[in-house]
Image: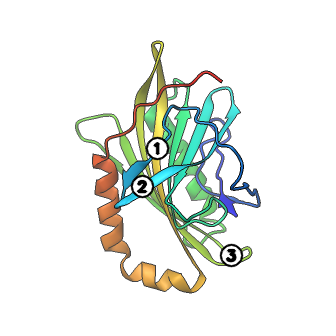
């Protein structure tokens, strides 16, 4: 099971339950010219899944060795939107989704941090699911603008997700604040890979 939230306008992924399954043998298309690995949290995250569901939206998911998109513990994701929407408007859409989710998800919450010397924004949020098993998912989204070539500017979201299951959740919550701080500042400082749309 994977979490996929979709905003009405942008189709921004952020985590609502889905039964979609992806075969590990499926060939993965590198739409963004970022094959990986992405080095983060002392791990190499390799390209594991990608999609181009609309004309303006691309996403690629990266996992450490031994994990799967069906059941992962850590994931890096690049969302790319060929849209003139502002970062503030995109963040506002995400926050509206999380506020709505609070009505049915007691763990749903978020924290927004703006760069005082730039336009980028960090959005942290937590969501949970209890459909087939208990899942708690912590996410950090780094919103920024990216040059994708040919004079095109896009909205890029570089995201990190950490997921724990069932009886593992209390142990994670015991170290959450330390883990949260480390992952947050590492993502801020992470050198973002250059994104170029590949010809498909």
Q: Residue at x 68, y 43 (%)?
A: 27
Q: CA distance from mark 3 to mark 2?
A: 30 Å
Residue 32 left/right relative to 5: left
Query: Image quadrant of residue 129?
Result: bottom right
Dot 3, crowdedness within 10 Å: few (<14), some or many (≥20)?
A: few
Give the residue at mark 3. Answer: 130
Q: Are marks 3 and 2 in contact (CB under 8 Å)?
A: no
Earlier in the chain: of badge 1 and badge 3, it is 1
Q: Are marks 1 and 3 in contact (CB under 8 Å)?
A: no
Q: CA distance from mark 1 to mark 3?
A: 32 Å
Q: Residue at x 63, y 58 (%)?
A: 69
Q: Position of residue 105 (x, y in %)?
A: 62, 69
Q: Image quadrant for the C terminus?
A: top right
Foreground of the two, 142 or 147: 147
Residue farthest to the top, as pictured: 150
Query: Image quadrant of residue 136?
Result: bottom right
Q: Secondary structure at mark 1?
A: loop
Mark number, residue 44: 2
Residue 71 left/right relative to 47: right
Q: CA distance from mark 1 to mark 2?
A: 8 Å
């Amino acid at each position: 099971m994977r979490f996929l939230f979709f905003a009405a306008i942008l189709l921004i992924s952020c985590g609502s339950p889905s039964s979609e399954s992806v075969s590990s043998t499926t060939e993965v298309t590198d739409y963004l010219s970022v094959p990986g690995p992405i080095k983060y949290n002392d791990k190499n995250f390799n390209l594991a899944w990608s999609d181009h569901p609309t004309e303006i939206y691309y996403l690629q998911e990266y996992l450490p060795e031994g994990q799967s998109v069906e059941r992962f513990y850590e994931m890096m994701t690049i969302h790319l939107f060929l849209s003139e929407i502002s970062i503030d408007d995109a963040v506002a859409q995400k926050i509206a989704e999380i506020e709505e989710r609070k009505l049915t998800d007691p763990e749903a919450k978020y924290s927004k941090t703006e760069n005082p010397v730039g336009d980028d924004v960090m959005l942290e949020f937590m969501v949970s699911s209890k459909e087939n098993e208990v899942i708690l998912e912590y996410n950090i989204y780094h919103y920024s603008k990216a040059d994708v070539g040919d004079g095109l500017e896009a909205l890029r979201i570089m995201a990190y997700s950490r997921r724990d299951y069932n009886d593992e959740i209390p142990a994670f919550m015991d170290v959450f604040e330390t883990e949260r701080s480390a992952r947050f500042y590492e993502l801020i400082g992470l050198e973002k890979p250059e994104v170029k749309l590949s010809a498909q």
